[in-house]
């Protein structure tokens, strides 16, 4: 992909980390979220925050739960960096379990 195409997304995929560079070069038109110029502003803002954070962050978006994550989150994936479909489901399930656990614990049901 040419630098002209990737430069077009510098305002969304900010920074010079590896994940920002990978996201700038990715063929988004072939993905379930479509090309970045069609994304809602809320997604663009979330991606900017995610890529500039030094804390582990990930974001699932859309009906197919497109999985975005930052450089700090990569060690969590281990050797499965960029093979993330399985991890999206796992992280969502674990997050929901944790939310339910603490909610029930707070109400005295546990």
Image (cartoon, grey):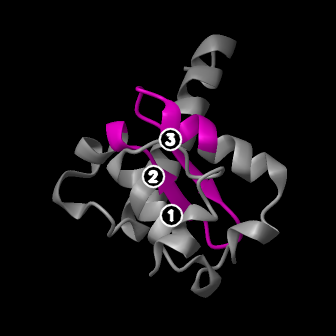
Q: Which residue is mark 2?
A: 20
Work out whether residue 2 or residue 72 is closer to the camera in this orientation and state it. Answer: 2
Measuring from the top left, give residue 85's x and y in whole percent.
42, 69
Does 71 lie within the magenta span?
yes
Query: Image height check: is 78 above or below 83?
Result: above
User: Label 1 crowding class (10 Å Cα cut-off): few <14, some 14-19, many 20+?
Assistant: many
Q: Which mark is residue 24?
A: 1
As drawn, is 45 to the left or to the right of 100?
right
Closer to the N terminus: mark 3 or mark 1?
1
Q: Which residues are magenta?
A: 48-72
Disc 2 to disc 3: CB gap under 8 Å: yes
Work out whether residue 49 or residue 102 is closer to the camera in this orientation and state it. Answer: 49
Cα gap from disc 3 to disc 1, whole angstroms = 12 Å
Cα gap from disc 1 to disc 2, whole angstroms = 6 Å
Measuring from the top left, give residue 31's x and y in whole percent.
59, 80
Measuring from the top left, give residue 11's x and y in whole percent.
65, 50
Query: Image height check: is 103 above or below 42?
Result: above
Disc 1 to disc 2: CB gap under 8 Å: yes
Quarter holding residue 105: top right
Q: Please state, as top left, top right, bottom left or bottom right, where the C terminus lies in the image.
A: top right
Discs 3/1, front: 1
User: Label 3 crowding class (10 Å Cα cut-off): few <14, some 14-19, many 20+?
Assistant: many
The residue at the point 78 percent across, 64 percent down is 39
Cα gap from disc 2 to disc 3, whole angstroms = 6 Å
Q: Which residue is mark 3?
A: 51
Q: Secondary structure at mark 1?
A: helix
Spot the residue most to the left. Answer: 79
The residue at the point 32 percent across, 70 percent down is 83
User: Label 2 crowding class (10 Å Cα cut-off): few <14, some 14-19, many 20+?
Assistant: many
Quarter holding residue 79: bottom left
Q: Is residue 48 at all visible to an observer of this figure?
A: yes
Query: Image height check: is 32 above or below 55?
Result: below
């Amino acid at each position: 992909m040419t630098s002209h195409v990737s430069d077009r997304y510098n305002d969304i995929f900010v920074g010079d980390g590896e994940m920002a560079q990978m996201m700038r070069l990715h063929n988004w038109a072939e993905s379930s979220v479509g090309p970045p110029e069609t994304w809602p502003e809320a997604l663009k803002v979330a991606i900017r925050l995610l890529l500039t954070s030094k804390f582990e962050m990930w974001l699932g978006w859309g009906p197919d739960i497109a999985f975005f994550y930052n450089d700090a989150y990569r060690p969590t994936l281990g050797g499965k960096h960029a093979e993330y479909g399985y991890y999206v489901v796992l992280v969502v399930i674990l997050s929901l379990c944790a939310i339910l656990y603490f909610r029930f614990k707070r109400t005295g049901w546990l």
